[in-house]
Image: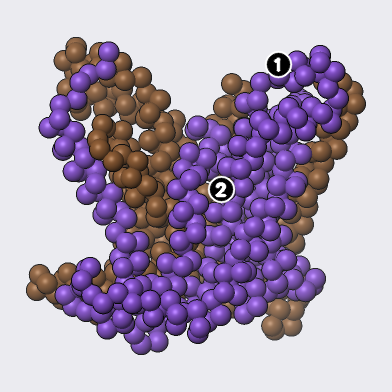
Chain colours: A purple, B brown
Amino acid sequence: MARAVTTQRKIINTTVAWMVGLLIFFPILWTILTSFKTEATAIADPPVWFFFDWTLDNYRVVQARSDYSRFLWNSIIIAGGSTFLGMLIAIPAAWSMAFVPSKRTKDILLWMLSTKMLPAVGVLYPIYLIFIKFGLLDTRIGLTIVLMFINLPIMVWMLYTYFKEIPGEILEASRMDGAGLREEILYVLTPMAIPGIASTVLLNVILAWNEAFWTLNLTAAKAAPLTAFIASYSSPEGLFYAKLSAASTMAIAPILILGWFSQKQLVRGLTFGAVK
Amino acid sequence: MATKASRAAARLMLAPAVILLLGWMLVPLTMTVIFSFKRYLPMRGGDLGWVGFENYVRFVNSSAFWPSVQATLMIVGGVLLITVVLGVALAILLDQPMWGQGIVRILVIAPFFVMPTVSALVWKNMFMDPVNGLFAHLWRFFGATPVSWLSEASMPSIILIVSWQWLPFATLILLTAIQSLDSEQLEAAEMDGAPPLSRFFFITLPHLARAITIVVLIQTIFLLAIFAEIFVTTQGAFGTRTLTYLIFQRVLESQNVGLGSAGGVYAIILANILALFLMRIVGKNLDR
């Protein structure tokens, strides 16, 4: 029987945990608050917390000044495109390894994982050269392909661990009932695989959205996604905290929301199924 | 039982992933290895022929090399220490009964979803700026002179920023692991009169050992490669030039591809040694 927890103990737990949680979340909260201030209020000393004239001006300025929508669009295309392309390749691969395993399946999986360990900087110049050669530098398609390769091992692994959990007896039963390979895939496996596929998509969109090595090194003006757009704020030009905050809030908001849905999958995806 | 036909189909389904990844790995890797044995200066004459191991020797002997190894070790070591210790503490805290557990968990893991350029810039400007940063306000409030964090205390500042980003990852994984701990075992120990500290050291910590190992290995691989955090804060100045950043500068900034590639090969070897340990653990898990 579980121990009864005293109310007093629970109050202490709650207080401490909320304080720690708010402390960790504070930089994000502060960024969001600052994004609604004027530039003067943003740097006021002592800092202003909640009681200021809330304004949406920063969001308007950022959108108008910097073609924000183009960077956003680039991020969406690159993150979405690389995930979509990757899934086209990863689903069949994970599928075949989970349902028709062979002696080499384990070796192939581990080898795929090892390609993820390759430090990006070690192959920076070759990729750079290949990009120049094929005219891919500063294009969305180039970046989409690179990010697809970077995340492909994680996609295969994650899908594999999900597919592995689909019981084989169900397949046998459907075969006994005379289902062919096509029916089997369409009506039996797909419905059971959809949750796993959805979480894999979610995690990979997040990873691609936040990727900040290749996106910074392989793009300039045209194909730059939000990571590069924010980096362009690193040279200070006078008072700009409120605008920086507005731009940052817009860049992280979609992923924060997606991320909260994918907490559990995050653990599985990033530990390659070693912790579930 | 898989039939012969389904085996052939399976191979066909697996082939694109294997072939593409093989190409993605082998082509750039081969190029890096070839460049590393050449004197190759794209802006100053291009490919100037083979030079044997000269680049490897020069990379290690350059005055920037050992400081960069030191900076890398400090960042990786510092962040690991902070995230693992605080991660265990936070995981235990979040596992306690409380009100609003779900919301607290969301607050704690949120930093992980913030893109590296945003978190680096927010910390750099809004917290660590010596004039307008919140830390400066705080220091002045207590009558102290504000610190110019990223130049005077560059290493601790970078470690703080990166730890903030990775603490959620450690916490989340350790929390998942802690939740699989049999609470009856802890209760039995408590009834036998084991004090909280020994319960932690003899039951909780051993149970977490595997998860901690995984956190350490995965984080090490990602931490060795951190780039954006340095790119938008110090640009490698004030002793924060890591091995990754040094190679980046050699290759793209000074356009000495031969030298940079030799550095790249060192980085690849280092990452592979670590990867070997990680794969052994993950591989064991596959057999179960």
Q: Is residue A200 above or below residue B44?
A: above
Q: Position of residue A170 (x, y in %)?
A: 71, 19
Residue that label 1 marks: A169
Measuring 33% from the left and 45% from the top, which residue is drawn there?
B103
Query: Which residue is found at the position 12% from the left and 32% from the top?
Result: A8
Nearer the observer, disc 2 or disc 1? 1
Estimate how packed mark 2 is, as few (under 14), some (14 to 19) or many (20 or more) residues with alpha carbons within 10 Å.
Answer: many
Mark 2 — residue? A203
Q: Residue A146's x, y, as percent?
A: 68, 60
Residue B278 seen in the figure: no
Q: Is residue A3 above or below residue A48?
A: above
Q: Quadrant of the N terminus of chain A?
A: top left
> Image quadrant of residue A120?
bottom right
Q: Chain of mark 1?
A: A
The chain letter under disc 2 is A
Q: Which of the pair A50/B135 is nearer the observer?
A: A50
Label ID, residue A76: none
